[in-house]
Amino acid sequence: MARPLDHAKRAELLDAVVRYIAEHGLADLSLRPLAAALGTSSRMLIYYFGTKEELLVQALSTHRPDLTAVFAGVGDTAALRERLWGFWRSNTSGPDAASVTVMLQVLGAACAPHGPYIRYADEAIADFISTLTGELRKLETDDPDIVATLLVSGLRGILQDRTITRDIERTDRAARRLIEQSLP
């Protein structure tokens, strides 16, 4: 008889997976070294998550922000600008920075035909654009889905630039300008 899943252990593993990948990268991820670093076995990781890809998708899913909460209570464009800036700061230097580094790696891997992360990446992007579009509609913004796409895609590109170049000042200025010009 199979042992029941230890949900606390599972949650702990998911959190540790994001930290591990943020430090070691996704490209050469192998279950054995990952499991060793997490103090478990590759067999137990497969038991808990099925596949390496599913492990990563579940780990990232636990770190996805509650976008409804991020934008809750936004009543005007100025408040939305500040909320987006706060979201940028949280994702670049706050507690979410490690999971964002991993997310960028997954988005890159999702660009490959038939990649294992396409569905996850598509859902993550669609969720962010949809939530932001809803907020922009409330503010009666022209072309809210286009403005949301510009903001989400633009900020993601600037975030990727920052991750690669480590140029904090320039990317912060670029993100601020994108937000301000997209939300006049």
Image (cartoon, rainbow, N blue to C red):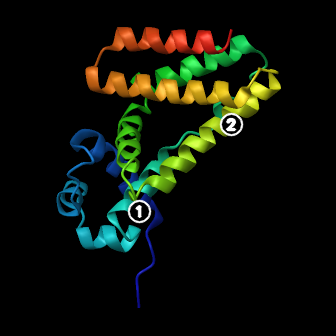
Which residue matches tag 1? 54
- The quadrant in which residue 116 appears is bottom left
Residue occupying image coordinates x 53% and y 48%: 122
Residue 27 seen in the current view: yes
**Secondary structure category for the residue under label 2:** helix
Which residue matches tag 2? 131
Crowding at mark 2 (Cα within 10 Å: few <14, some 14-19, many 20+)? some
Give the CA separation, mark 2 to mark 1. 25 Å
- The quadrant in which residue 164 appears is top left
Residue occupying image coordinates x 48% and y 44%: 63
**Vertical relation: 43 (above or below) 102:** below
Foreground residue among 51 and 12: 51
Residue 43: x, y in percent? 26, 73
**Vertical relation: 124 (above or below) 49:** above
**Vertical relation: 36 (above or below) 73:** below
Residue 161: x, y in percent? 35, 23
Amino acid bearing label 2: Thr
32 sits left or right of 128 in the view: left
Residue 22: x, y in percent? 30, 40
**Secondary structure category for the residue under label 1:** helix
Q: Quadrant of the N terminus?
A: bottom left
Q: Quadrant of the C terminus?
A: top right
**Vertical relation: 44 (above or below) 125:** below
Residue 62: x, y in percent? 49, 50
Residue occupying image coordinates x 23% and y 62%: 31
Residue 113: mark in rendering: none
Crowding at mark 1 (Cα within 10 Å: few <14, some 14-19, many 20+)? some
Label whose residue precedes the other's in the sequence (2 or 1): 1
Residue occupying image coordinates x 50% and y 22%: 88
Foreground residue among 56 and 137: 137
Amino acid bearing label 1: Glu
